[in-house]
Image (tube, rainbow, N blue to C red):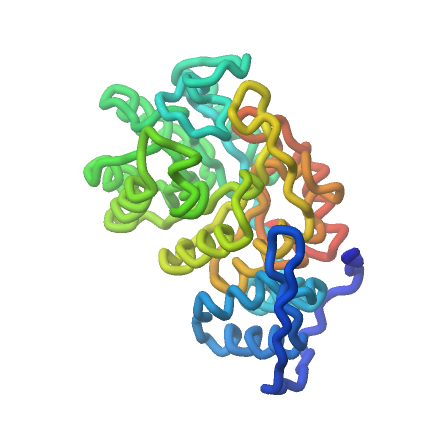
Amino acid sequence: MVLSRRSKKYQKNCKPQFRTRLTFEILINANFLTITMSPQVILELEKKVLNGQKLETSELGQLINTEHLTTLSDSANRITRMCHGNKIDVEQLANIKKNYCSEDCVFCGQSAFFNTGIDSYQLLPANEILEMAKKAKTEGAQSYCLVAAWRQPSESDFIKVCDIISLIREKVGISIECSLGFLTIEQARKLKELGVKRYNHNLETARSKFPQICTTHTYQDRLDTLEIARKAGLELCTGGIIGMGETREQRLELVADLAKIEPEEVTINLLVAIPGTPLELQTPISFEEILRVFAVTRFALPKSIIKISGGREVHLEDSGEELLLSGANGIISAGYLTLGGNPMKKDLEMIKKINLEAKA
């Protein structure tokens, strides 16, 4: 199925007529079950979401397996526009400590377990990170995330990170997020005290898939960290990586867990197979499967920011235009942890091209 690019803006007064009659036909399609059903079912579930009702996992399953991808995409776009308007959240990252992480996540080029040839450095000097934050704000980023490749910060490194946060708050005035691995409740409360808005800690994949992705910590460890951050009063950003060999059912499993957490932001990454990692030969995920995940995540979490994250420029020929009209309302720009990215100017032009607007 080829998805057509939509050039016109969403019409606010679209009021489809809903029907209750539907017929299901289950078809075996490659490794997936595709559900043939009336497009009206999608519209009924859209109406349910816009009425403030939370969808059941079974209903999300109907959506992720539908053959009516254009209807699914359009519905997810309407939910996004109704809940968030035309604003797009644009974020930049700072990889403040790179490589030689103690964890064995099989997708990661920064793990000490794999020889990927990626350069490394310890915690960057505060002034260098400050200048990067200034540049991000000048270029138009709405938020700035400090990311460190370690299991959890040592006491001395955490103090340094806190000093960096204070410096950015004083000199730049950009919204600050952090991704520092596992935290104690005392550390989380300190970040909140310093004005950190959101803590980023991905689930990475479905619980059932996680043991194949990482053995040095558990899925529950990651859930516990999110609970600590929430308890400290921090907003949450969490999500995962798709295209690591998981099934569509496992992608649904991840979305269902995210819906239970109700994070303020969801990041969906597209695997970039890094040479030297166990996933270096992983077959890329199709665009149709990518779209299913973004659209269904919007149905599951209508009020969350849903951000197109790592792998955007590698896997998406349009840099994310179609996904920004299919449930997503945020992007990470100007590079990722170990990969380059589009210049901010190009991304801002892309957002304008599809009649959307970057948040100020």
- In this rendered view, identify the residue nearer to me: 85 or 109: 109
Q: Measured along the vertical axis of the image, is residue 65 above or below residue 97?
A: below
Which quarter of the figure has residue 175? top left
Which quarter of the figure has residue 103? top left
Place of residue 301 in the rendered image (x, y in percent of width and height, measured from the top left):
47, 61
Q: Residue at x 73, y 46 (%)?
A: 350
Q: Residue at x 50, y 70 (%)?
A: 59
Q: Measured along the vertical axis of the image, is residue 310 above or below residue 29?
A: above
On the rendered image, what quadrant is the N terminus found in? bottom right
Residue 274 horizontal side relative to residue 214, left or right: right
- In this rendered view, identify the residue nearer to me: 149 or 35: 35
Place of residue 230 in the rendered image (x, y in percent of width and height, measured from the top left):
29, 50
Q: Residue at x 43, y 43 (%)?
A: 209
Place of residue 168 in the rendered image (x, y in percent of width and height, measured from the top left):
42, 31
Q: Is residue 210 visible?
A: yes
Q: Measured along the vertical axis of the image, is residue 214 above or below residue 298?
A: above
- In this rendered view, identify the residue nearer to me: 151 or 332: 151
Place of residue 154 in the rendered image (x, y in percent of width and height, measured from the top left):
26, 22
Q: Residue at x 47, y 68 (%)?
A: 58
